[in-house]
Structure formats: structure tokens, C-alpha cells
Amino acid sequence: MTHKPCKGPRLGVRHLQSFLLFLGLTVMHIARLNVSVAIVAMTNAATTNPNFPEYEWTLKQKSYILSSFYWGYILTLCPGSFLCRRYGAKVVLFVASCGTAVFSLMTPWCITWGGWQVFCAIRILQGLFQGVIFPCVTEHLAMWSPPEERNRLGAFSYTGTDCGTVLAMFISGMIAKGAMGWPGISYVSGALCAAWCFLWLIFASNNATESRFIGEAECKYIESSLEHNEDFHDRTIPIPWKAIWTSVPFLALLVTRCAETYGLSTLQAEIPSYMNGVLNMEIQSNAVFSSLPFLAMWLLSYVYLIAADVLLKKKILSLTSVRKLFNTLSFWIPAAALIGIGFLSEENKNLAIVLMTVSVGVNSGATIGSSLNSIDLSPNHAGILIGLSNTVANVIPILTPLIAGEIVADKVSQASKKNDGKSQIENNNKYMYFPISQHNRGQWQIVFGLAAVIFFLGNVVFIIWGTAKAQPWDADDFLKPKDAESACQKSKSIVAEVAPPIDPVLEQQISWPERYTAKAIE
């Protein structure tokens, strides 16, 4: 009869850590994305809340405000990995959320005297603070998630991004129209981040051995499942840079994440412009339509989570197979939807909304498919891997509108002038769009077709070279000098040759150093 190891309580401290990460991603994404709603209220006070100041900013100035967050964000992705390894996820995430809260609370006051330039500066600083979030989240999950629960805990934590996106749209609009006006958007966001800081400071711990709330059984279960050396938490593991950059599974993951970012940014950023320019739809003026894709993404992420849990628990598929299956669904279905949307006419507006909602929703499977794969490849260096991959992948959303602009620019008219210069830049997305105009559908088919091809090929790379197995360079002693063991063995053999023979009867009465000294004197 085999003895099953005790796993501690069904709902333990490891689940509390996952829930804290979920809340943290939610509140920090609200603070990140609420600017798209706030900027509309700030420049159109008459239609939102006339009791608060209105600013006459140009489209170019608005685009700077919307994109400035990512100027700072991309700079701290890699440094965030090192900070997390040096100080631990608890301290770094606490500082990141505190910085986000402080600058959110300062925003309304600073704008009154500094205008859009100061607004941009604040957004850059918030981006610098939030750039460390995902490396820390990944590192924290690696420390707290037993391999068999990694999908469940990791995917649940990451759904905070979708929850924050949906809430940023609904809550921000309601606040702007209420008694607090557009300044209230920043105040509420700052207060939520500050409240999370308080919870995180009390209940979070860098690992199971540091937690004061965890039971002995759960702590032993987590630590033993991660297969660490006894002194793992007391030392710093050197980073095998050469092995990482020459690792085929990591390079496959890097290509896959770039492909996912390009396809998703096309879904989020370019389709609304296509719907307005080709299908003559003002979809972004409707908060329900603009949030539907993200609501679908949030809800479907739990469907993926439950399905993956069942497949793994019943051993129907291996973890590698689950990753590749879910990644295929989240890449190839949106690829087909992108092509389909390109062929729709103005009479198919409802179908266009359905396709956009389904494609963005289905893409949520990429969290289990490839986003969590960095923890599989190297739990010890998961923060470094996510920092590297996110740094490269986050360049893609900057390039996506530029590539699309090169393809359709010749056919964009200046019809937006009749709408007083208002464009898609005032919507709830974080990217820059084309002016409101009549576009050539054939050129948009090229834009969507290119994204579909990248979606398709990115997943092919993952299917062929991706894996969920830990890599050899994840070992604690991977960078240990190769000749260390041989030198040790050699010294032992030398000692054996020098040591003089001794009668077995006297062996229990005299120590080896004494025997050796006596022989040397002789």
C-alpha cells in the first residue's frame, strides 16, 4: 500500500497568494487602462460631466498620453527580473503598487498646472513602476505553485488582467459621469492600489518557508514538489545566459509570444478602425460593445482553466500536449476570424461584432498555452525568462499600427474632419488608430491576412519546438565548474595512496591524522 503525501488544506496559503496576485493585476490594470476613458471625459466635458474642467488637446497630444505609459513600461521589464531575484517579489510588487497609487492620486492636481505634458510624464513614471509586475508575478508563482497545480494557480492569477480591463471600462465611465467627475477615476484607482498594498504587505511571502500563516504540511508539500536544494532560499543562483539564449524551447516560446502579441494587438487595435472605416460602425462609442471582447476573454479563461485541470488530473493529456492544444485553439481560431472579418460588408455588422468577441475571447487560452510556459522551462529563472520575452514582445504593439498604416495609408481620407477631428484615439484601447474615414477593404484584408499568417506560423513553431519540460540549465548547480567533482575524486585517490596501511585491530584506537603523522615521521 503506497502512502500518499499530505498536500495540506484544499484551500491553503498557496491559494491565498494566487488570489492576491489576481487582485493585484486587477487593480493595477484598472490604473493602467482607465486613461482611455478619462481622456474622453477630460476633452468632452459637455457630454460627460460639465462640472469639471475641459481640455482642448489635439489628436497628437492625446496619442502621446495614451502611449506614454508603455515608454516607461518596456524599460523596466528586464530590470524587474533582477530586482525580484535580489529583493523578492513581495518588496518589489509592494513598491510597484505604491508608486502606481501615488501617481494616480497626484494626476488630477498635476494636470491642472502642467497640462498634457505633465500627464505624459506621470504616465511614463507609472509605466516604469508597472514594468516589474509580470516578472515578479511569474517568479512568485514559481515559488508557490507545485507543478501539478501550476496551471490552476497561474491561470487564475493571470485572469486579473482581463478582469481589470473590463472593470476599467465600466467603472471609469460611471465615475466620470458621477459626482467625482474625471478626477475621481484617478482617485479611485489610487485608492484601490493602496488598499491592495495593505493586503499584500500583511499576507504575502516570497516563499512558503517565510510565511507565518502556512501550516507545516502545506509548506513541506510545496517545497518538496519544487525539488530544491536545502539552501535554495539562502543563496542566489547564477543565471546561465548562454544556455538560455541558445535554448531551442525558449527561442520557440519567444517567437510564439511575439506572434501572439502581434495578432492580439491587431484584434484590439485595428479591427475597431476597420469597423468604422469600412463597415461604418461607431462601435467604440458604445461601452458595452467595446468591453464585450474582454468580458469574453475573462470568462473563457476560466473555461480553459477547468478544461486543463480535467485533462491533467485524469491524465488524458500531458502538460506539454495541453499547452500545445490550448495554444493552437487560441492562435488558429482568431487567425480564421481575422480573415473572415476582412471579407464582411456593411450589411454584416452584427456578425463582425460576434467574430471580434469570439476571436478575442478564444485567445485567452494563450495564458495556459504559452504564457505560463516560462515557469515550465525554468522555475528557478522564470522571472528572467518572462522579463526577456515580454521586453521583446512588447515592442510589437508599437510596430503593429505602423505596419498597418503603411498598408492602408494611401486610401485613408480626411472625412474625419466632419466629426470635429475626433478619431479612434478616444476609445477604450491602448493603441493609436487611424482617422475616421472610408478605407479600402482590400488593403485591410492584407493587414488581417498578415496577422493571421503570423498567428499560424507562431503556433507551428510552438508545436514543433515547444515543451513543458524543465530544461537542464534550470538546475541549481548548472554553472558549477565541470572539473569540481573530478578534482574532488582525484584528491581522494591521492589521499588513499599516501595514507599508510594499518592493522584492523588498531583502526578503532587511532585516528587517521595520527596514523598519517606517525608514518610521515618514520
Image (cartoon, helix red, strand yellow):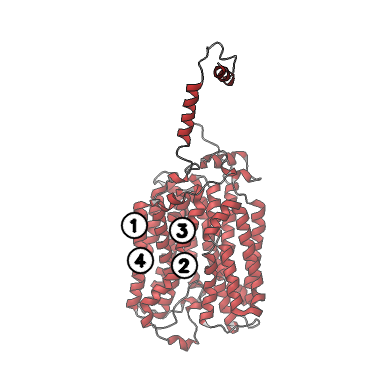
Distance between the alpha carbons at the discs numbered 4 and 3 = 21 Å
Label 2 vs 3, first from the N-terminus: 2
The image shows residue 25, relative to residue 52, as above or below, that is above
Dot 4: element: helix
Label 4 vs 1, first from the N-terminus: 4
339 displayed left or right of 238: left
Q: The disc labelled 1 sits on which kind of residue?
A: Val
Q: Residues within 10 Å of mark 3 (few under 14, many from 20)?
A: many
Q: The disc labelled 3 sits on which kind of residue?
A: Ser
Q: Which mark is residue 389?
A: 3
Distance between the alpha carbons at the discs numbered 3 and 1 = 18 Å
Label 2 vs 1, first from the N-terminus: 2
Residue on which the image places disc 4: 452
Quadrant of the rendering where the C terminus is positioned:
top right
Label 4 vs 3, first from the N-terminus: 3
120 displayed left or right of 354: right
Residue on which the image places disc 2: 293
Mark nearest the camera among 2 and 4 is 4
Q: The disc labelled 2 sits on which kind of residue?
A: Pro
Q: Residue at coordinates 56% horizontally, 57% vertically from top-left?
A: 22
- Between 230 and 462, the residue placed more toward the observer is 230
Q: Does residue 180 appear anywhere in the picture?
A: no
Q: Where, by quadrant of the figure, is residue 355 drawn? A: bottom left
Distance between the alpha carbons at the discs numbered 2 and 1 = 25 Å
Dot 1: element: helix
Distance between the alpha carbons at the discs numbered 4 and 1 = 12 Å
